[in-house]
Every structure is written in structure tokens, then in C-alpha cells.
Image (cartoon, rainbow, N blue to C red):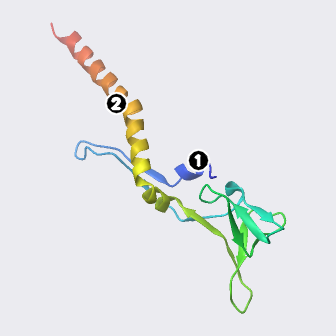
């Protein structure tokens, strides 16, 4: 499982302004690699790499991890015996796939944190202006 810091690195906040009353969060991410963040381990018995790239245990056949390395590699069917990294989930794509859950979590967070803060700031401004009137 990836850490929140790794995921947050691909997120950009677009705050609301006077001309645009809508705030947004944009997610742009390349494909991630299967490594120790996804609990990647070489399974000698199956000659594969076990990982939890999509939050469930999976095996990548014909993949391996070099000693002292953390990145999982797989062989490519080519004449030169090439290797390429084992790709994991794309954060932006997973965000879209689970849009209802993400929206529910965002609305819940907004109701719990943002709305009380807005109310507090409005009440503060009203109290400040009420004191100025003679």
C-alpha cells in the first residue's frame, strides 16, 4: 500500500476565487511501479512476485526482484532478453474508477471540516461589524 505522502504528491488543489466559486482537486499521475510500497516479495515456490498493488494479494508470474533491489522486474518477449519494470496502479485512473467513493469521502470531509470553519469566519466578521456600528 502506498503512503499518503506519495499519493498527495500527485494531487493539486485549485481553490475557489471571486470569479469561480468552485474548488477542485486535480489528480495527475504516471503509472506506479510495484516495489516495497506494495509489499512486493519474491515467492520462490511460485517463481513469481507477490504484491498488493490494488489492495488485494496478487501474483505476477515470471517476475522477480534482484537481490538488494526493491523494484519488481519482468521479462519481455524479445530476442535480446529485455527486462521491464512491473507496473502497478495509476493513481489518477483509480481515482476515476472509484469516483462515487471519492466524492462521498470529499463531501463528508467538507461537511465535517470546511462548513464549520466557514460558519466560524462569517460569525466572526458579523461580530466585528456589529461592534463598529454606533
The residue closer to the viewer here, 132 or 74, is: 74
Which dot, 2 or 1, sits closer to the camera?
Answer: 2
> In this view, which residue lies farthest toward the left?
134
Question: Image height check: is 76 above or below 86?
Answer: below
Q: What's the residue at 79%, 70% (across, down)?
A: 46
User: Which residue ends up furthest to the top in the rendered image?
Assistant: 134
Left-right relation of 4 to 107: right
Spot occupied by residue 35 in the image (x, y as percentages of width and height): 70, 61
Instruction: Give the secondary structure at mark 2.
Output: helix
Residue 76 percent across, percent down from the top left: 68, 83
Horizontal relation, residue 131 to residue 101: left or right: left
Q: Nearer the viewer, residue 111 or 134?
A: 111
Asked whether the residues under the numbered discs 2 and 1 touch, taking CB atoms below 8 Å apart as contact, a structural biologist would say no
Quarter location, residue 31: bottom right
Residue 116 % position (x, y): 36, 26
Q: State whether residue 48 is above or below residue 78.
A: above
Q: Which of the two labelled residues, at mark 2 and mark 1, occupies the earlier sequence position?
A: 1
Q: Secondary structure at mark 1?
A: helix
- Picture residue at 62% right of the left edge, 48% below the top: 3
Q: Is residue 80 above or below residue 91?
A: below
Q: Which residue is mark 2?
A: 115
Disc 1: CA contacts within 10 A as few (<14), some (14-19) or many (>=20): few
Question: Within 10 Å of the Cα at label 2, are there few (<14), some (14-19), or many (20+) other Cα atoms?
Answer: few
- Spatial separation of the CA atoms under disc 2 and disc 1: 25 Å
Which residue: 41% across, 54% down? 99
User: What label sits on residue 103 in the rendered view?
Assistant: none
- Residue 5 - label: 1
Image quadrant where one finds the C terminus: top left
The percent coordinates of residue 11 (x first, y second) are: 47, 52
Number of numbered discs on residues: 2
Amino acid at each position: 500500500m502506498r503512503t499518503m505522502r506519495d499519493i498527495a504528491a500527485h494531487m493539486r488543489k485549485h481553490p475557489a476565487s471571486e470569479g469561480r466559486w468552485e474548488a477542485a482537486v486535480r489528480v495527475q499521475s504516471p503509472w506506479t511501479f510495484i516495489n516495497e510500497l506494495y509489499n512486493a516479495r519474491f515467492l520462490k515456490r511460485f517463481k513469481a512476485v507477490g504484491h498488493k498493488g490494488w489492495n488485494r494479494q496478487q501474483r505476477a508470474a515470471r517476475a522477480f526482484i534482484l537481490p538488494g533491489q526493491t523494484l519488481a522486474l519482468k521479462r519481455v518477449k524479445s530476442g535480446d532478453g529485455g527486462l521491464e519494470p512491473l507496473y502497478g496502479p495509476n493513481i489518477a485512473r483509480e481515482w476515476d474508477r472509484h469516483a462515487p467513493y471519492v466524492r462521498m469521502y470529499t463531501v463528508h470531509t467538507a461537511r465535517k471540516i470546511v462548513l464549520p470553519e466557514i460558519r466560524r469566519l462569517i460569525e466572526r466578521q458579523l461580530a466585528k461589524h456589529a461592534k463598529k456600528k454606533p
